Amino acid sequence: MTDSPHLSDVSDASQEDGFVSGRVRWRRFALLTVPAVAVTAGLGIALAQGALAASFAVSGQQFKVSAKSLEGEGFAQYGSVDVNAREELIPVAVTAIREARLDSLCQSVVTSLPIIGDISLNLTAGRDKPVEASNLFVDATQLSGDAVFTNIEIGRDASTLDKGPADAQGMQDLFGQQADTVRITDLKQTAWATNAGTFKLTGLSMDIAKGKKECF
């Protein structure tokens, strides 16, 4: 007659199986959570260091900005992220200029509303006298134009930038570039946010119209 397995043997086997199964699950859990924890920790450090871009939650709409020309002193550029009200991360290229002058500035944003359709808000300034801005930060996703830089440094660690505004620095080990001066003609850019210490708009005009009416 074959002996029945002892209860202790069954218990030991069950505990061993349970231990192995649990170990596999914990490994999978760790593999899934470690990247998320690392990203969260990195963003926490970035927030503490002020390395994230806009200091406010950005809207769900990008806007367009154009200018006949932009002249700036103290230029810096680096990658960063904006955060919207749903705490989603939005990658941006931050352009920071210590002192900027813009000729024939145009800013536009289009909002699509139910039943009404598209509504455009357009702002223009600086046609007779350039717009002036100090400590200007633009969080952009697209920029084009003809640019000339003086004493440019390309590929500098973003955390060591020192030619732009005082706070114009990104996270350590990330790409950055800077220059003593910058001039961009036929400027066109699409952005999520703009910050400035001062923003002087001479000849300011705002217009709201039905349909799409954009700067470019």
Image (cartoon, rainbow, N blue to C red):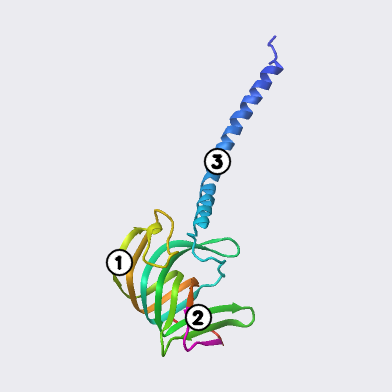
- Amino acid bearing label 2: Ser
Q: Secondary structure at mark 3?
A: helix
Q: Residue furthest top?
A: 1
First of labels 1, 2 by sequence position: 2
Q: State the image coordinates of residue 108 (x, y, percent, origin top left).
A: 50, 80
Residue at left offset 45%, top offset 72%: 136
**Residue labelled with disc 3:** 30
Q: Amino acid at mark 3?
A: Ala
Q: Tell me where residue 215 sits by quadrant.
A: bottom left
Mark 1 or 2: in front is 1
Q: Quarter of the image for the N terminus: give it.
A: top right
**Residue 114 horizontal/vertical position (percent):** 64, 78
**In this rendering, would 31 be left or right of 149?**
right
For the C terminus, give its image quadrant: bottom left
**Is residue 8 positioned above or below 158 on the image?**
above
Q: Residue at x 42, y 89 (%)?
A: 127
Q: Which residue is mark 1?
A: 152
**Mark nearer the N terminus (3 vs 2):** 3
Q: Which residues are magenta?
A: 199-208
Q: Is residue 172 magenta?
A: no
Report how far apart the C-alphas of labels 1 and 2 lie in the structure. Answer: 31 Å
Whether residue 137 sits left or right of residue 23 in the image: it is left
Q: What distance separates the C-alpha of mark 3 from that of mark 1?
A: 44 Å
Give the Cα distance between marks 3 and 2: 46 Å
Residue closest to the eye, 175 or 19 = 175
Other residues around mark 1 within 10 Å, as few (<14) / some (14–19) / many (≥20): some
